[in-house]
Image: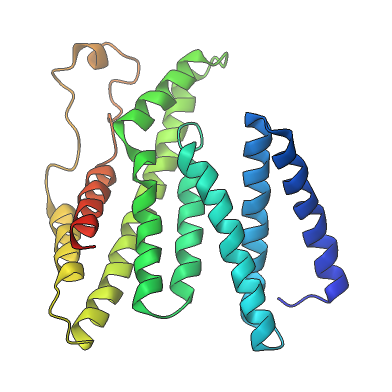
Amino acid sequence: LRLTPGAEKAIVEPMERSCKIYESLGTAHAAHQAAAAHYQLALYFSRVWTCQRDESKTREKLAAAFKHFGLAHQYFFRSVYGNEPTFVVLSLDFSNLYSAVSGEECLSKALACCLDCRQAFSPTAVAAALERVDNSKNRNQSSDARAWFEKMTTLAENVEGRVSKLLLSLVKIEKDGGSASSKYKDMYRTVLTHKISPGNKKGDENDEEKTNSPYCDLPSSFPVYDLLESLTKRMSLTE
């Protein structure tokens, strides 16, 4: 996708103006709207950077994509609860942009984007989601809760698959480079252990409050949360 300068201006300028207006308002709602606009700009630039007429334009569009992804990610990282699906999808898109640029550093940052979204799958996120459903005026509360779990379960699978793929690529780089470190190999082994573990589902049989809840058959967290937490600790220990 390569647009004429005029066509690109017609797309980009209104969104950039929206960002500035929302950011100037200083309210929580405006901050959310600004982050959403940055996300849309990031998606646009991530689509066009690979098909520019010269290297200078390519670098310019790629830099713009990283800039807007970074600003959107910064907001949603601080405001995960209530925005869990959006934050996870954004993190996966940000990860894809990093992995489109070759090299170990970018692949490592792509992996970090996936690890960053772990709180969206945490017990706190689950509890907050159920509380929002309970506090809503929608009569189909159970249906809403299940729809959220279904969406997050699919995203959890996507994140786990993405992490596995990135670690495989990093293990190859580690091996081909003759590195003495086995950081990524050890992390990939953690993923494999997680996949074959029979204890991936949380048990709540002894939790009376959960048993008496209309959501008693729903998990208290997602298995991928423990995986991402473990991988994050391994990353931080070796940095």
Q: Is residue 41 above or below residue 22?
A: below
**Residue in the image at 36% along x and 24% along y:** 127
Q: Is residue 86 visible?
A: no
Q: Is residue 55 above or below residue 221?
A: below
Numbered marks: total: 0
Quarter holding the N terminus is bottom right
The residue lying toward the viewer, choosing from 160 and 106, is 106
Q: Residue furthest right?
A: 6
Q: How is the image coloured?
A: rainbow
The residue lying toward the viewer, choosing from 19 and 184, is 19
Q: Is residue 60 left or right of residue 104?
A: right
Quarter holding the C terminus is bottom left
The residue lying toward the viewer, choosing from 126 and 147, is 126
**Residue in the image at 23% along x and 15% along y:** 211
Q: Residue 43 in the image: x percent, y percent?
A: 62, 61
Q: Residue 184 in the image: x percent, y percent?
A: 21, 69
**Residue in the image at 67% along x and 73% along y:** 48
Quadrant in the picture for residue 35: top right
Q: Is residue 227 left or right of residue 25?
A: left
Q: Is residue 228 visible?
A: yes
Q: Residue 160 in the image: x percent, y percent?
A: 31, 56
**Residue in the image at 67% along x and 58% along y:** 41
Q: Residue 11 in the image: x percent, y percent?
A: 80, 61
Q: Is residue 112 left or right of residue 219?
A: right
